[in-house]
Image (spheres, rainbow, N blue to C red):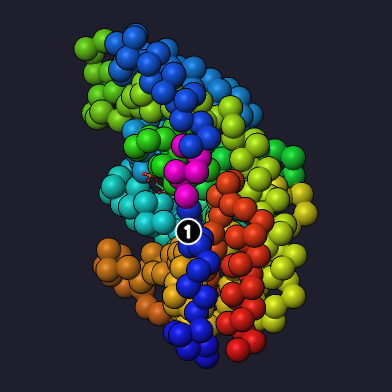
């Protein structure tokens, strides 16, 4: 192992994410958009939000978008609009951000996990048959790290059981599967505009997109106190509205999204080129006809924790998404799962590591990350 004294101290840090580089590039446009909102003095459910809904729906290739307060709310509202009720079961992967599961729990429904594929980290439809029960009411798929789940077999299964499919597209806006955008594949799709996402607001924000006018109308009602007309509520809802300031910021960023995605793909190609030479390191899989948007560039390596420490000592940022699969979270202790129940998710949780990835990342920074991984392996 290289000793502390040999660590090059002059090299600049490579953060895992650097939002300030993005703000330096687009700050003037953002400030103009903010001025526009200030001048309008309209802050909730105004023109910016309505325009953003149309623009995001178009990007996803569907006809309706409904802005909400966060990706988590998008999941809760979409599942509720799809008819999920207390006591129902919902199929979902255990290897995801906790919000995918807690949205199910928030409705009083029971998360039923189906293991992931070890190569893509996305839900494995081959698992569905043994997890489905007469109480199953919906399937949630997560397009993890920016890569679409294998939707054809998922949709075929869902159709055979008449189950709605909700896409958790928090990490994969703009990705595609066999020529179709994520967001247009299931019955309803949930987006998060959390600041670190590929399209990130300056606070919390989210959206539900769908081709169903009925589901869109239902989410629109639910996000605003169940009001079907002004001050007339037909069912219990709450306040989950997307504000005008966030919408205006997102509209500015949306104009840059395809360039940013191109930059991410080019960084991924460079990482792949450099890392594919290193034994024991598995770069992310991007199957043909899946267009990955690399929200994360996630490698797999057995000595993950030691590598992360090594990189950290050399001021190279990295993150583990996610160290605890949902079925082993204290939150879900009452479901009675044990280690070994979902082996692919558990192994991924021990071995994945997301490397620096953002559009403004420079080639020499990628080279430095790869060089250090190589040093770690060969030392
Ligand atoms: C896969 C996934 N689902 C759901 C969410 C929840 O989104 P939000 O943080 O906007 O509530 C996130 C992001 O945080 C996510 O990554």
Q: In this view, does 162 lie to the left or right of 81?
A: right
Can residue 295 be seen here? The reply is: yes
User: How many numbered dots are placed on residues in this image?
Assistant: 1
Q: Nearer the viewer, residue 65 or 20?
A: 20
In the rendered view, would you say 333 is above or below 242?
Answer: below
Give the residue displayed 41% in from the left and 42% down from the top: 195
The residue singled out by tag 1 in the image is 15
Q: Residues within 10 Å of mark 1 (few under 14, many from 20)?
A: some
Is 177 colored magenta in this rendering? no
Instruction: Please provide the residue range marked out in magenta.
Output: 18-23
In the rendered view, would you say 10 is above or below 256?
Answer: below
Q: Position of residue 379 (x, y in %)?
A: 60, 89
Q: Where is residue 260 in the image (x, y as percent from the top left)?
A: 61, 40
Can residue 53 be seen here? The reply is: no
Check disc 1 and report its element: helix, strand or loop.
Answer: loop
Give the residue displayed 73% in from the left and 71% down from the top: 276
Q: Where is residue 22 in the image (x, y as percent from the top left)?
A: 50, 40
Q: Main secondary structure of the magenta part?
A: helix
**Residue furthest front in the image:** 10
């Amino acid at each position: 192992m290289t000793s502390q004294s040999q660590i090059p101290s002059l090299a600049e840090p490579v953060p895992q994410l650097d939002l300030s580089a993005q703000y330096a590039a687009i700050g003037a446009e953002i400030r103009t958009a903010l001025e526009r909102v200030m001048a309008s003095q309209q802050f909730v459910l105004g023109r910016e939000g309505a325009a953003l809904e149309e623009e995001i729906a178009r990007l996803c290739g569907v006809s309706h978008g409904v802005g909400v307060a966060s990706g988590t709310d998008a999941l809760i509202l979409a599942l509720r609009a799809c008819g999920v009720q207390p006591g129902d079961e919902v199929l979902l992967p255990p290897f995801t951000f906790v919000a995918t599961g807690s949205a199910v729990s928030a409705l009083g429904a029971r998360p039923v996990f189906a293991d992931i594929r070890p190569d893509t980290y996305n839900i494995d439809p081959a698992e569905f048959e043994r997890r489905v029960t007469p109480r199953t009411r919906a399937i949630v798929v997560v397009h993890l790290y920016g890569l679409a789940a294998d939707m054809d077999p998922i949709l075929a299964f869902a159709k055979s059981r008449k189950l709605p499919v909700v896409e958790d597209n928090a990490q994969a806006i703009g990705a595609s599967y066999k020529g179709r955008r994520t967001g247009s594949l299931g019955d309803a799709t949930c987006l998060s505009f959390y600041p670190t996402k590929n399209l990130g607001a300056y606070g919390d924000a989210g959206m539900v997109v769908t081709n169903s006018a009925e589901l869109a109308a239902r989410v629109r009602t639910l996000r605003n106190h169940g009001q079907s007309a002004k001050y007339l509520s037909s069912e219990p809802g709450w306040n989950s509205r997307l504000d005008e300031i966030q919408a205006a910021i997102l509209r500015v960023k949306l104009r840059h999204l395809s360039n940013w995605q191109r930059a991410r793909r080019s960084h991924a190609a460079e990482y792949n080129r450099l890392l594919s030479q290193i034994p024991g390191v598995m770069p992310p899989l991007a199957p043909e006809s899946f267009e990955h948007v690399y929200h994360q560039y996630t490698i797999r390596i057995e000595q993950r924790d030691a590598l992360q420490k090594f990189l950290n000592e050399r001021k190279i940022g990295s993150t583990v998404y996610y160290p605890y699969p949902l079925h082993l979270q204290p939150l879900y202790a009452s479901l009675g799962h044990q280690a070994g129940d979902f082996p692919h998710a558990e192994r991924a949780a021990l071995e994945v590591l997301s490397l620096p990835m953002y559009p403004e990342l420079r080639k020499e920074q990628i080279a430095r990350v790869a060089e250090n991984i190589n040093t770690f392996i060969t030392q």
